[in-house]
Amino acid sequence: MAQREHVQSLNGAEGEDDLSSIRDRLRDFAAARNWNQFHSPKNLAIAISVEAGELLEHFQWNEYDESHAVPADKMPKIKEEMADVLLYLIRLGDVLNIDLTQAAKSKILLNAERYPVDKSRGSAKKYTEL
Amino acid sequence: MAQREHVQSLNGAEGEDDLSSIRDRLRDFAAARNWNQFHSPKNLAIAISVEAGELLEHFQWNEYDESHAVPADKMPKIKEEMADVLLYLIRLGDVLNIDLTQAAKSKILLNAERYPVDKSRGSAKKYTEL
Amino acid sequence: MAQREHVQSLNGAEGEDDLSSIRDRLRDFAAARNWNQFHSPKNLAIAISVEAGELLEHFQWNEYDESHAVPADKMPKIKEEMADVLLYLIRLGDVLNIDLTQAAKSKILLNAERYPVDKSRGSAKKYTEL
Amino acid sequence: MAQREHVQSLNGAEGEDDLSSIRDRLRDFAAARNWNQFHSPKNLAIAISVEAGELLEHFQWNEYDESHAVPADKMPKIKEEMADVLLYLIRLGDVLNIDLTQAAKSKILLNAERYPVDKSRGSAKKYTEL
């Protein structure tokens, strides 16, 4: 009951639509179902990889990627798989006490050092090969 | 130069630390390097899967997951791999014009329907088997 | 028709049950369906990864791995996913003109050098950390 | 010592270059290093997925797939990653007591039923959508 209200409040205008808000919802979700026993870091890392594979499956054979145009009827499933990857990633961040937003920003700064504009422009090479 | 200032402003106090802020930085990052040619949905979906595999590698043999305690010296690499998954996921969301935050919230609502507390408590079964 | 007989001969006693026999069947299979257009190395590498994810999904939450005992009712699906990974791997080997058996043997020799018995006994460390 | 001779005999002309020969070598390899403790089905399924991701990484951005021509200098690494996937797959087959060759042949027969030539010619659709 309380659980239900909680979940519905996701749509409420609470002025917080970032990763920490989702993290808290997932934490409640797992606690209410007694799922923390399954949510070891190892199992969550597996889940991220499995969901990433399901996302990739939608791009397996078709060549619609080249025009950057994905058929409209494919979008809901792709969206759902992307959400799955994100949810497990946020959950793993919570379990490991990692601030994902901060981690993402730090990685962008590192990438900016690794891939200086002048060296990497128009190149798909890894920084170790630049 | 402008690029550099842009990237450094990530650490600035701009009152926006959510996914859309990171999305904009990644968009600028790719544009400055002329990388949009590589960022087809298919290639980004591959990148997400590859990075998820690199994250998973850290949990491959070791059993430290069971205590939920990951050795401190493993954390920086795990954090970086998680950031990589997130960055490519945000980039794919941008290319496909998907609002990731909204997608995640919708998926939580769907999961709440699929996994009612009373049926799923303490169970690792998929909703199709509940 | 000829196709059908071909496929059924897989069960025949032809004294060849190795990778090259399967490779030839897959080659005929793809040719008969005009699927070579989809079987680029990139697409086949994606397929291997997607199938590996489907295989991994069966081990996602459950802890039956620890006793090394997988429930009998899970075995047919696991077997099928393993076959899928193998079939795409053989197909990629064919497309890239790689002798998989030879590649596997060479890798075992390399692993024997990287992991000398005395240094690696009882250790899950990567050779770079031994 | 005995181990060393074993490994070297891989290059010998023993008239057996199939999966069961490699399986036996991997079994000896793991036993000599006391690695069976790490080779749970779950860990081996993770390893297959991680190696499939490393293989996929070589096809991540580049578009050489379309001509089916992979640069010669990329081939040794690709070959090695393919071997890694195969070795862990064979090892998992051994641990689960699955005959991989038989599993692959059964799957080809199933695929022949699922993808009749006349319905699937030139189509990349999944059998469930044919």
Image (cartoon, coloured by chain):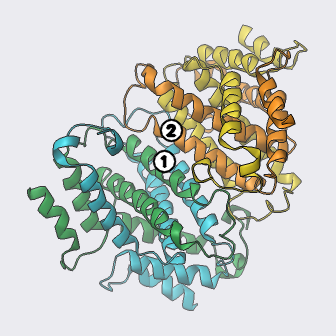
Chain colours: A green, B cyan, C orange, D yellow
Left or right: where D66 falls relative to C69:
right
The residue at the point 60 percent across, 14 percent down is: D31
- Mark 1 to mark 2 CA distance (whole Å): 7 Å
The residue at the point 80 percent across, 62 percent down is: D66
Q: Residue furthest left?
A: A2
Left or right: where C104 falls relative to B68:
right
Q: Up-down: is A107 above or below D69?
A: below
Q: Position of residue D21 (x, y in %)?
A: 75, 16
> Is residue A111 in view?
yes
Residue D92's quadrant in the figure? top right
Residue C111's quadrant in the figure? top right
Say few, some or many: other residues with alpha carbon within 10 Å of mark 1 (under 14 / 14 to 19 / 20 or more).
Answer: many
Q: Position of residue A116 (x, y in %)?
A: 64, 77
> Is residue C101 in view?
no
In front of the other: B110 or B108 = B110
Could you tell me the amino acid type at mark 1? Answer: Val
Residue B33's quadrant in the figure? bottom right
Q: Residue furthest top?
A: D2
Q: Are marks 1 and 2 in contact (CB under 8 Å)?
A: yes
> Which residue in the structure is indicated by mark 1?
A50
In front of the other: D83 or A109 = D83
Q: Up-down: is D28 above or below D70?
A: above
Q: Position of residue D118 (x, y in %)?
A: 76, 49
Left or right: where C113 falls relative to A50:
right
Q: Image quadrant for the N terminus of chain A?
A: bottom left
Say few, some or many: other residues with alpha carbon within 10 Å of mark 2 (under 14 / 14 to 19 / 20 or more).
Answer: many
In front of the other: D77 or C62 = C62
Please, what secondary structure does the residue beneath circle 1 have?
Answer: helix
The residue at the point 69 percent across, 72 percent down is: A66
Question: Which numbered marker is on residue C18?
Answer: none
Could you tell me the amino acid type at mark 2? Answer: Leu
> Which residue in the structure is indicated by mark 2?
C56
